[in-house]
Structures are given as structure tokens and as C-alpha cells.
Image (cartoon, rainbow, N blue to C red):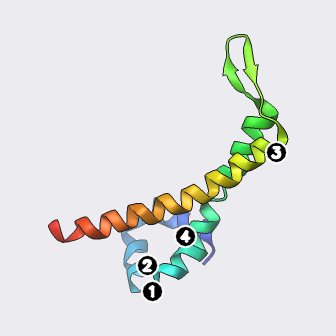
Amino acid sequence: MSLIQRAKRILLQPNETWPEIAAEPASAGSLYTRYLMILALVPAPATFIGMTLVGVGGFVINVRLPFFTGLTQAVLSYGLMLVAVFVLALIAEALAPTF
């Protein structure tokens, strides 16, 4: 099943999809490489295009980042997204016994 089909089924048919997902053998590493690294790529090009081509601002003022600054920000946001998910997973794992 492709990533897009899986996401559609989770959103549209959660009662049927979650038991199937629970039955699949998966490790943290496989989830990270098969899903997270792909889904975290979505905001990176959007950030680059938004900051360098469209710009940020309001009213009359519009500020655009230089090409390499926007590229650096996109790469850093991708890396920090992966780190943030890892840290949130550690927090959830630490808090799980209290629930």
C-alpha cells in the first residue's frame, strides 16, 4: 500500500485501518524511513518557495530571502522536523506509563 493510500484510509476509514496497522510488524527505524522522512519533506520546498519567491510581509512591505538563505532554512527546517518528532516520541514514551 502506498503512502498516499495509507493516509487516505487512516482519515476516511480509521476503524478498519488501525487494526491492520497494529497487526503489521514495524520497527521505529522503518517507520522513520518509510513515513516520517517522506512526510517531513513536504514543508521544506514550500518554505523555500514561500520565503524566496513569494516573500513574507504585509500591507506594502514584502521581504524575500536570498536563494541560499532560503535553501539553508528549508534544509534546517527539514532536519529540525525530524529531531522534533524524535524528541516528542521520547517524551510520549516517558509519559506513557502514567496513563
Q: Are marks 2 and 1 in contact (CB under 8 Å)?
A: yes
> CA separation, marks 3 and 1?
42 Å
**Left or right of residue 64, residue 93 in this image:** left
Residue tagged by mark 4? 6
Q: Label for residue 21?
A: 2
Category of crowding for the residue at label 3, using alpha-carbon neighbours closer than 10 angstroms: few (below 14), some (14–19), many (at least 20):
few
Amino acid type at image mark 4: Arg
Which of 31 and 67 lies nearest the eye of the viewer?
67
Residue tagged by mark 3? 68
Category of crowding for the residue at label 2, using alpha-carbon neighbours closer than 10 angstroms: few (below 14), some (14–19), many (at least 20):
few
The secondary structure type at the circle numbered 1 is loop
Tell us which disc is closer to us: 2 or 3: 3
Label located before the other in sequence (4 or 1): 4
Amino acid type at image mark 2: Ile
Label located before the other in sequence (2 or 3): 2
Q: Image quadrant for the C terminus?
A: bottom left
Amino acid type at image mark 1: Glu
The secondary structure type at the circle numbered 2 is helix
Q: Residue at x 46, y 66 (%)?
A: 86
Q: For residue 4, what is the image quadrant?
A: bottom right
Residue tagged by mark 1? 24
Can you see residue 99? no
Amino acid type at image mark 3: Phe
Residue 22 locus on image (x, y percent): 38, 81
